[in-house]
Amino acid sequence: MNKKHNHIKNQLVKYFVLLSLFFVFGCSNTKYLPEGDLLYTGGSVQVKDSIMKKKDRKALETELEALLRPKPNKTFLGLRPKLWFYNIAGEPKKQKGFRYWLRTKVGEEPVLFSKVDLDYNSSVLRNFTENRGYFKTRVSADSTVRNKRVTAEYTVVPKKQYIIKSVTFPDDSLKMSKIIARSSRRSLLKVGNPYDLDVIKAERERIDARLKEKGYYYFNPDYLLAKVDSSKGDHEVKIRLVIKDETPAKALRAYTINNIFVYPNYSLANDSMVYRKKNITKYKDFTIIDTAETFKPRVYDRTIYFKKGDLYNRTDHNLTLNRFVNLGTFSFVKNEFKPSDSIDNALDSYYYLTLLPKKFIRVEVLGKTNSASYTGTEVNLNWNNRNFLGGAELFTASIFGGADFQLGGANKGKNIYRLGGEVSLTWPRFITPFNIEGNSEYVPRTKATIRYEYQKRTQLYALNSFNTSFGYLWKENIRKEHQLNVIDVTYVSPNHVTPEYLADIEEDEALRRVIEKQLIFGPTYNYTYTNTMQKRRKNTIYFNGELDLAGNLTGLVTGANIKKNDTIKIFDVPFSQYVKIKTDFRHYLKLGKESELASRLIVGAGFAYGNSNTMPASKQFVVGGTNSIRAFRARTLGPGSYVIPETTTNINYTPDQSADLKLEFNTEYRAKLFSIVRGAVFLDAGNIWLLHADPNKPGAEISKDFMKEIAVGAGVGLRFDLSFLILRTDLAIPLRNPALPDGQRWIIDDINFGNSSWRKDNLILNIAIGYPF
């Protein structure tokens, strides 16, 4: 125990010395300053107002401080490490090398007080507060110098804030004025609210958007004038919105759609407007000018929402452009509206479409490693055709192969080889017996897939896996996405099972299920909701729900019941019958500009019945590994408190562990350290369980004490953001192991980084691409 304490003491001393040196060097930034200049360390704003609530005053101060320019050098624990790196790098003699990288990529040049304009900042603060209704605001500025560092202090003395007394809208005889008046209940300008110039601007944009839906293509927000009268009342304003007298006549008229022209082979380099009469195709309301007959005309009918005679509206305008983009066949989409030569108050619509290459090949080469000590590579070769049948269909044919080698650990020599192929065809529409028209900006799709994979586990067995599916993918909007496979069939057949593996089955009967023939068919449904693309939100979420119904209708029709020995076989293989559901919920809390707290909760359950007494091994849940509970090796945790018995010690590899139920929770703090490097501290917890007791796996079934069988791990990680990918390294240790006897599962006291044997068994390094969630 004394040795352990001495080791910890020595480590603490080292860290203290390093930290002290960092503080010493961190404080020496000012000696590199130009002669006569000072280091600017930031500005502060104090709002002096005896009427304003303290909470509102602090909020206003925060907003005002964000407007100050320039921004000071970034700090960490009160120091400026980026500035320190800039200084120690010195002036590089050549624009390359380590010193240049350290100075320009890691470092940050000093922000000097000579760059600070106090008067300019004062005017910015004054304008901002007056735009918020604090008219006749006074702003003063001063600075404080200490040890070659200077701070700027601004004092803002606002007057009482003006509020809105009344709002009136255009009341002339124009038709658009009546449209504006009818939408006044949705106005952003509310009587009793504070005067705010930004709200006035937003209200003008709201009115413009409303008019765009009613055909006023040439109108814009600048044609609206907000007249503000503050001459009467006690700190009150009257706002009157009027249409400017100089508004062009065409902006006051609503327009309909006349002719619609489509150029599917438009080129930015060549003159695509040159064509002959035979290149013109009339289809419904469209005039298609295409020298190569690139697409079947119905493609445009499904994509363009405008029809001849329709009133122009921005919704259909944007929907059409977005659907052209989402077809995935065009690199450039341009749209123009021009006044019609033949009809008054009408627009001719022109669509100029530049094609992506129709056929292309993509090669992917991956290197990978996981916590089970497997290291390997994978190669994917994909051939794609973006217009396979002339209707913007995407055809993909791919072959793939890979190998995973375990150079150490329990599975040494049990290498894994994979080889396979897949073909898929995706139509940019719903293919159904009845007509379904989508009204989303996202193109609905129908996808058919056929896939084969051969997997060989050296010295153990090989598996042939066939899969075919047919289903639909569609997005309601940017947040909601659905995938429904009405047909999803999987057939797995083993071969080359070695005598060694058959002997292992005699010691662990659970291994037999891995090499059983499997026939799985039935619909699957997947729903995803996310608002994580809204970067400005402090709280964002991601939710994914999966439903898998295998063999349910067939089992009902045939009356299959394995408990009564009424097992139904198809092609001499019992089909699987079960219900499986899985939910994945994630929450992201924005803590700062470059930091966040990310959390995930996974709950899954599978119930086999009818023709099956257990879930197929390939459909059960697993935990542990790179994207799960990182302190435990992949597929080795659980189920429950189950421990591989000592009688199976002749098995010289670790069998995969899977089960019917899953509960997992992960949370990690993420923050940018410097340049492309980001750091993380994480905690993972969870386990899997069997739904029913298995005599061959004592302790694996779910019980009322399942929370006592939760595994816990923690660790730290580094992530390297290379723009095109994120390389992740996570180092984790177990804190709680459910395989240990009850009462001894917390193993925090056993942590001993100085012990090589402990490090070998408990330090788990995970290397992966991308974030775990």
Image (tube, grey):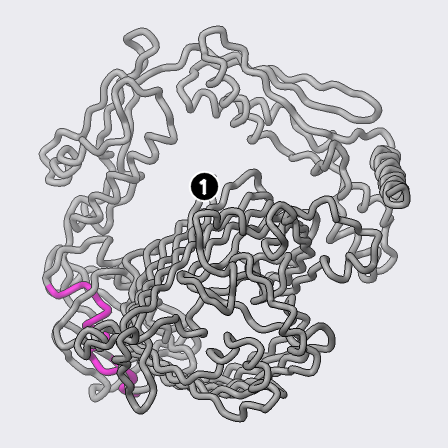
- Mark 1: few/some/many CA within 10 Å (<14, 14-19, 20+): some
At 67% from the left and 78% from the top, the residue drawn is 650
Quadrant in the rendering for residue 506: bottom right
At 83% from the left and 26% from the top, the residue drawn is 148
Image-based side of 711 in relation to 87, left or right: left
Instruction: Give residue 639's position: percent from left, percent from top.
Output: 52, 61
Image-based side of 505 in relation to 275, left or right: right
Residue 536 drawn above or below residue 720: above
Quadrant in the rendering for residue 97: bottom right
Of 446 and 322, the residue lying toward us? 446
At 33% from the left and 60% from the top, the residue drawn is 527
Q: How many marks?
A: 1
Of 201 and 405, the residue lying toward us? 405
Instruction: Give residue 692's position: percent from left, percent from top.
Output: 40, 62
- Disc 1 residue type? Asn
Residue 708 drawn above or below residue 391: above
- As helix, strand or loop, the secondary structure at mark 1 comes to strand
Instruction: Give residue 560's position: percent from left, percent from top.
Output: 23, 77
At 73% from the left and 30% from the top, the residue drawn is 40
Residue with the mark numbered 1? 539
Q: Is residue 344 visible?
A: yes
Image-based side of 420 in relation to 431, left or right: right
Q: Which residues are magenta?
A: 289-308
Of 725 and 746, the residue lying toward us? 746
Residue 424 drawn above or below residue 126: below
Quadrant in the rendering for residue 485: bottom left
Quarter of the picture holding the N terminus: top right
Instruction: Give residue 695's position: percent from left, percent from top.
Output: 48, 67
Of 98 and 5, the residue lying toward us? 5
Q: Main secondary structure of the magenta part?
A: loop
